[in-house]
């Protein structure tokens, strides 16, 4: 067994990463970092966690635990200040190391880009031991659009996400009174996932995220114009993937089928009246959009089976 | 008091129309048509309805009741077969009479267009006593786009609606197991509201509706390219409206604020990276998207105060 | 017109009280108190509020505005420190003045009981100009049980409420990640509404509140043993009420029908196997459970029509 | 590998049973019965099901497939007419074979009780190869109360369930317009799970189920009076269980932690004012309340590891 440490275990992405590690055949969680829970038993986070797991330690200590792989799930500030130990594989689930352009990295994250590779396994597999895990919106948009990028020069990406995408911190936008029985766009024309999408596609897209009144799940409806046979491009891109499923003609992606999983669904449609193609991607923002992809990236860098520990099986209703 | 009849009172739009009539200072519901509830007291529909109201009658009888205004809330088949009584104002909340183009009307509704005017008060006020009430999606898209139509030549309309838009009939797509904690697009590139939107704008739009896991509310995110000052166009269009509210710069429309009301909210944003303008309209699909607009149309044709009986006041959380 | 002031307008009960005042034929809101919004226009709370309303003022200033009636919607601390102006009617929507027993008042609210009457109009109409508005859970339990109190000597009250009952402040228990797609009891055997219920009934009840994943609405399922004809007792108690509706045999109360209203529904059932009667009350925690009842109390003390400004009409779906 | 057949695979409990079989190390699904999908590939039920699985066959054919274990997930009528093949283990997830009393079995299910054992593993492990799988409500009530049954002589069971408990068939009570943003009791004093609970406890309970606006999850709040040390009784009963978790003092059960799992949580509280103990059990109605328990029962009868194939690990948020 290889060993794993998590920084920021008490957040949504940290807990979900731990969730995958508990079922991973080759990775054992040996250090659970959390500055707020340090010193407490694992069950302090969740009564489902029992005596097999070690107590929480401060994030610093988890980072220095000597684990083979470190998952950075803490705030961007923690990730920005983190110095990867020699030899360790590090997967950053936050945004800090995603943008490679110096100006963009400084504008959106306040720091210079480092030597991290952008690890979107189906599009740009991780290179080296430092991996920037893509944002949830960017993952959905890129799974839908990257296979088509040679044939399009722009896109409208209208995306909708469940509330866990905004994390566990207390703020009005995550208050149940704002989220329940409501629906609204946010950060219109000003979301940091827009440059992240553009970086991989090679052109800008119009990106508007919306907040769905659900816990988990993300669906991106992408509008493009292209003369190419987009279905062939998509099917070829994911022909060998166990993670991304291109749906048959006429079947629409839906959150219920990706809920709680590390898979993604893609559907393709055409609007004859305007000649527009509509590529729709659904995934779980905490699965393929975060923790599942982080494990997938770690597996690739560590030379393990790509989908070890992932939640891909099952047909839960 | 003028008198009103409803055909199809037991459906969502019928019940909401009745709801407005109960609070209307000039219109009194005198005939409640429902083929399924005929002969039963009003309370059979809802325990809140008490002895003041007449018993249900068959739709045919309600149509022949001699009421001053008739609201057609029954299935499209009932509306298609309905012969408006001489002199009566008739507002059809269904789709039957919305499309004026003979080919389109036949393709989508299976009949030739009649002498009905398309009554979207802020854009195309009703003319004559036969009024086709716009669809909920079309209302949102047109409130957002009609004031800009001289300056744009296309749009992507990504729309999301609560489940009451699909009515009370039993079908899998309205089953709680499909709707709850789920989200998905439907009728992609093939929804009958698309030609309805095009008819008023004068050009086709790409329209994709999605089903939100909420009872009520609809939000349309519209993407356009234009050189004009769109904010001025929108603010001028609705400067005198008590129904449509153009939000200040930076404020996003949200369902919670239009829930249960007959108002609409419009927000305008710009994506600098791509030069795209984003016009977002939120309304209640059963309010401004159906019953509220039907009452507004009836008021206009009958010469009553435009907003009599509408739910426009209040700041319910 | 009489004048009204609100302290704590920016909270849920404050906003809902303002909502009723906007539709009240005899009461005009002249002072909107909010320490956080002081100096800002009314629209800062909600874009639906327009120029007709005055700007927000500090709560102190609103309390000294000389209004005929003052609604205390701020935190219990503000209410505890508030000195009612001579001659003003004051309705406290918080818990501070509900308990009359000195020990209980000190234990639960940290202060001695004052000269406030407990204003539950159908059970104990307000006396004098200082009114303690009942808690939402207590209102539901007492509407169900008070008419039966001579014939029972105990009850189990299993109650479920929407999340607005917990207010707008930021805390984990109101975070969407705790509320959405979840359900749990809280404050089991330790909720301050239990002694409030006991105070009016004359005996203790077992009270367990649960948090529903909805914005609004509260349902209390009450279990009692009694030999009396409970249906007659309930129907007599509410025969003349426009607010409380005893449902016909076999009809169950539901949140959807009281959502957004100031009404309450009561259903009565019998479990033959155990000889237990089940009295179920549904209401909107922000309507009859808070702001609606506050207006009703104010109307009674001011000598206005009891239901002026209340939301009792309508059959919204 | 042993082989398994499912009758009624297209229903909620059938699909969830298949879901567990897909992850089961010792059981292989070899016959998928569904009268509505007969002849179609497995993917016709759900795009996640791929080519590894056989096509659907009629239920009759699935029953005669010679599988080692047969899961009856079809309507009660199918189960009542089903003749277990010699030697096969049969687990009936419906209600047909749960009641042993002849009068009760006839009253609630219209047939005489057969030679089926009531398989609630922690309370009454299955005996013989024909197993009646308990109802979801009965499972929760009995996990909470069975360990206490010597010390109590009655209980109020106030239960709340997600909508999947009502199945996939089309009816108004499962329509999203009834379920979403709503909450109501149903079958008050008249639910067939009440005699099922009484059968195991040895006395009647007052049982009221309510419909929660969530897909999955069930919570039963049970009120009892007892002098015994109930915590010890509960902790002893489940000390060795991997499935049932007695929570520490002060921790409340919640749906989120059992969602999608085959585990159950139990919390114990005391109301000092009335001397009432409150035992609360949460589980997933489709997991421990149906498919998970069916697999657990099958494992026990087949001599496999009790929890093989169950979803017990993980801390998904």
Image (cartoon, coloured by chain):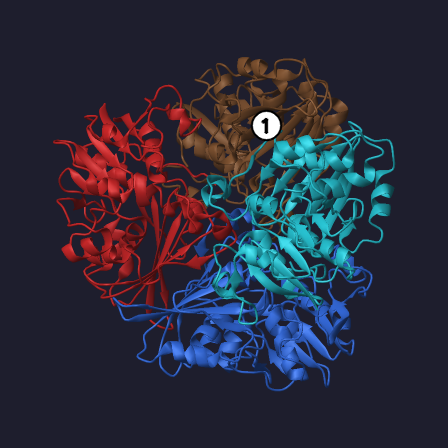
Chain colours: A red, B blue, C cyan, D brown
Is label 1 in a helix, a strand or a loop? Answer: strand
Answer yes or no: is residue A210 visible: yes
The correct choice, above or below, for C209 with respect to A209 in the image is above
Q: Residue D189: in sight, yes or no?
A: no
Q: Quadrant of residue A309?
A: top left
Q: Nearer the viewer, residue D207 or C293?
A: C293
Looking at the picture, does residue D45 appear above or below residue A301?
A: below
Is D156 left, or right, of A97 in this rendering?
Answer: right
Residue identified by numbered label 1: D280
Image-based side of B87 in relation to D286, left or right: right
Residue found at x 65% / y 29%: D96
Rendered location of residue D130, percent (x, y): 58, 21
Residues D129 and B134: in front is B134
Q: Position of residue C31 (x, y in %)?
A: 59, 62
The answer to whether D4 appears left or right of C86 in the picture is left
Tell me the quadrant of the picture where the C terminus of chain D can be found.
top left
Q: Chain of mark 1?
A: D
- Residue B183 % position (x, y): 45, 52
What residue is shown at x 72% (from left), y 18% (from top)?
Answer: D153
Q: Is residue B190 above or below residue A249?
A: below
Can you say which quadrant of the picture contains the N terminus of chain D? Answer: top left
For label 1, the crowd category at 10 Å Cα-Cα, with few meaning under 14, some 14 to 19 and many 20 or more, is many
Please give the count of numbered marks on the rendered protein. 1
Frontmost residue, C307 versus B196? C307
- Farthest residue, direction front: C86
Provide residue B78's location: percent of width, then percent of height.
Answer: 66, 71
């Amino acid at each position: 067994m290889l060993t794993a440490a998590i920084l920021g275990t008490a957040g949504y992405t940290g807990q979900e990463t731990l969730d995958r590690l508990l079922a991973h055949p080759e990775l054992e969680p040996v250090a659970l970092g959390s500055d707020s829970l340090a010193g407490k038993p694992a069950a302090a986070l969740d009564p489902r966690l029992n005596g097999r797991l070690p107590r929480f330690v401060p994030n610093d200590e988890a980072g220095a635990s000597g684990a083979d792989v470190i998952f950075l799930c803490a705030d961007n500030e923690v990730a920005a200040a983190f110095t990867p130990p020699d030899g360790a594989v590090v997967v950053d689930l936050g945004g800090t190391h995603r943008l490679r352009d110096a100006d963009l990295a400084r504008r959106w994250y306040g720091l210079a880009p480092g030597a991290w590779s952008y690890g979107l396994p189906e599009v740009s597999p991780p290179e080296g031991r430092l991996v920037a895990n893509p944002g949830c919106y960017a993952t959905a948009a890129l799974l839908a659009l990257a296979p088509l990028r040679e044939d399009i020069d722009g896109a409208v990406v209208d995306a909708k996400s469940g509330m866990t995408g905004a994390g566990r911190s207390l703020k009005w936008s995550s208050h149940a009174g704002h989220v329940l029985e409501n629906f609204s766009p946010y950060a219109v024309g000003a979301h940091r996932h827009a440059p992240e999408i553009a970086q991989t596609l090679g052109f800008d897209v119009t990106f508007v995220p919306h907040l769905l009144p659900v816990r988990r799940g993300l669906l991106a409806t992408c509008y493009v114009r292209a003369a190419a046979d987009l279905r062939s491009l998509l099917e070829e891109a994911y022909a060998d993937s166990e993670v991304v499923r291109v749906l048959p003609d006429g079947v629409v992606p839906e959150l219920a089928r990706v809920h709680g999983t590390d898979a993604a669904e893609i559907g393709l449609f055409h609007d004859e009246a305007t000649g527009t193609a509509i590529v729709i991607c659904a995934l779980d923002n905490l699965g393929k959009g975060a923790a599942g992809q982080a494990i997938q990236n770690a597996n690739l860098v560590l030379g393990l089976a790509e989908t070890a520990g992932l939640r891909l099986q099952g047909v839960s209703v």
